[in-house]
Amino acid sequence: MIPVIAIDGPTASGKGTVAGRVAEALGFAYLDSGALYRLTALAAIQKGVELNDALTVSHLASSLDVRFSAEQIFLDGEDVSDAIRAEEIGVAASKIATMPTLRAALVDLQHGFLKAPGLVADGRDMGTVIFPQAQLKIFLTASVEARAERRYKQLIGKGFSANMTALLQDLRERDERDTQRAVAPLKPAEGAKVLDTSALTVAEAVAQVLAWYNEASTTK
């Protein structure tokens, strides 16, 4: 069986950065599942599709032409790595992620990323829904204050405007939506190891995940 490391957690917890570096360290493929929802939101906005039109949004998602390359993400051949990180896109992605039809449309697309020698997948339901067979499941989290500060620095660094008060409010609202939605709510998967990164550096978080993976590999 091809090994999978599933890393779930709330917005701005650092799971994407950690997952990407773990995948690089192990030579595994990497799936940023959250990007798929952001890509769908971006595509919908670009095409003028109403975000509350579940059927059209879901059909759009099922035909996405997506390619991950190192730290770049391409949609229809265009580098949209920065575009999908805009707050407008993040808010839209969180809203459409509650659609059961959209989540179903993206399942096959996500399964397609599983290939030898292994996969590191990050998101909100990787260990609970998409890859329940994962060899290692991690719930990576951080305080809302730490997450807001990280997002603020990320946005400012990319040239976007940002307001700390607004970011805190937005993160709390996203957490509420993600944990309370009827389909695939955000929660630790059964048997998941919880990693709070509030006081950890990226290198420390990556080292902990790799240590857990080595431990899991030697016990199975």
Image (cartoon, rainbow, N blue to C red):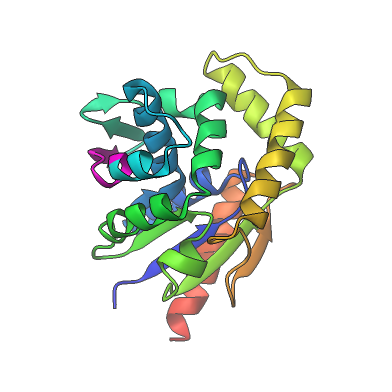
Find residue 185 and report its horizontal and vertical position in percent: 59, 60
Residue depicted at x 71% and y 28%: 167
* 88 sits left or right of 144 in the view: left
Residue 194, quarter of the rendered image: bottom right
- Can you say whether 56 is above or below 193 in the image? above
Find residue 70 and report its horizontal and vertical position in percent: 32, 38
Residue 56 visible (yes or no): yes
- Can you say whether 7 is above or below 17 in the image? below
Quarter placement of the C terminus: bottom left
Quarter placement of the N terminus: bottom left
* 196 sits left or right of 74 in the view: right
* 38 sits left or right of 13 in the view: left
Find residue 3 and report its horizontal and vertical position in percent: 35, 71
Report if residue 64 lies within the magenta region. yes
Most foreground residue, 188 or 107: 107
Residue 24 visible (yes or no): no
Report if residue 148 lies within the magenta region. no
Residue depicted at x 39% and y 67%: 4
Find residue 162 and report its horizontal and vertical position in percent: 66, 18
How many numbered marks appear? 0
Furthest residue in direction bottom, as rendered = 220
- Can you say whether 177 is above or below 41 in the image? below
Bounds of the magenta span? 60-69
Residue 84, quarter of the rendered image: top left
Residue depicted at x 40% and y 49%: 102
Most foreground residue, 49 or 109: 49
